[in-house]
Image (tube, helix red, strand yellow):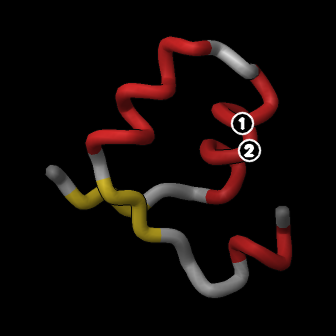
Amino acid sequence: MTDFVIDTNVLMSILISGKADYRPILTFNNFILPDFALIEI
């Protein structure tokens, strides 16, 4: 597993797109979000 820092806008784009191509990426990597990310979502 690899750790990545990800922006909220990128995460939202992945979630909204609904593409199955992103599932392996989200499953096998750790994403670190800033504290305010959940507020923005």
Q: Residue at x 62, y 86 (%)?
A: 35
Element type at mark 2: helix
| Label 1 environment density (alpha carbons within 10 Å; few <14, some 14–19, many ≥20) | few
Residue 21 image position (x, y, % from top left): 49, 13
Taking 2 as reference, is 31 left or right?
A: right
Element type at mark 1: helix
Q: Quadrant of the C terminus?
A: bottom right
Taking 41 as reference, is 9 left or right?
A: left
Residue 21, compared with residue 31, is above or below; it is above
Q: Quadrant of residue 38?
A: bottom right
Which mark's residue is nearer the viewer, 1 or 2? 1
- Which numbered dot is residue 3? none
- Inter-mark Cα distance, 1 to 2: 5 Å
Residue 1 image position (x, y, % from top left): 15, 51
Residue 26 image position (x, y, % from top left): 43, 40
Q: Amino acid at mark 1?
A: Leu
Quick check: marks 1 and 2 in contact, CB under 8 Å?
A: yes
Q: Which residue is mark 1?
A: 15
Q: Quadrant of residue 7?
A: bottom right
Q: Which residue is mark 2?
A: 12
Q: Residue at x 62, y 43 (%)?
A: 10
Q: Residue at x 74, y 44 (%)?
A: 12
Point out the residue furthest to the left here.
1
Residue 23, compared with residue 27, is above or below; it is above
Q: Amino acid at mark 2?
A: Met
Taking 16 as reference, is 37 left or right?
A: left
Q: Residue at x 75, y 21 (%)?
A: 17
| Label 2 environment density (alpha carbons within 10 Å; few <14, some 14–19, many ≥20) | few
Residue 4 image position (x, y, % from top left): 31, 57
- Number of disc labels: 2
